[in-house]
Amino acid sequence: MLTDFYPPTIGGVKRHVATLSEHLVKRSHDVIVCTVTQRGIKPSEVCDGVCVHRLKALFQRVQSKSRRRY
């Protein structure tokens, strides 16, 4: 699975991906979720049988000298 965020972040799509992943694990599937890293959360862990990898996104790697304000 690939998602922008994953629990413990709160949101409808995040919860849906987590629930779907957990149900697939219960049906004997190997499930790996790749998502965006967040401060204070482990980069890799197993949550309810789901292997979660949190990776740095491109926008997290690039530092801008000027910040646009809209």
Image (spheres, helix red, strand yellow):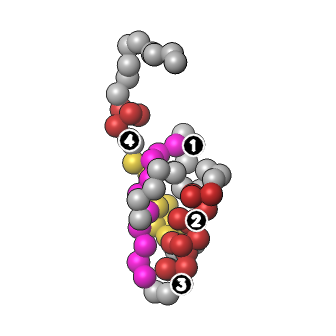
Local SS, label 1 = loop
Mark 2 or 1, nearer chain start: 2
Q: CA distance from mark 4 to mark 1?
A: 16 Å
In the drawing, does residue 12 fall left or right of residue 38? right
Please state the extent of the stretch shown in magenta in the rendering: 29-38
Q: Measured from the top left, where is residue 62 in percent x and y?
A: 35, 27
Q: In what quadrant of the picture does the N terminus appear?
A: bottom left
The mark closer to the camera, 2 or 4, is 2
The reply to whether residue 8 is in sight is no
Mark 2 or 4, nearer chain start: 2
- Residue drawn at point x = 51 percent, y = 16 percent: 69
Q: CA distance from mark 1 to mark 3?
A: 28 Å
Kind of residue at disc 1: Gly
Q: CA distance from mark 2 to mark 1?
A: 23 Å
- Residue annotated with mark 2: 16
CB contact under 8 Å: marks 3 and 4? no
- Residue annotated with mark 1: 40
CB contact under 8 Å: marks 2 and 4? no
Q: CA distance from mark 3 to mark 4?
A: 30 Å
- Image height check: is 24 above or below 40? below
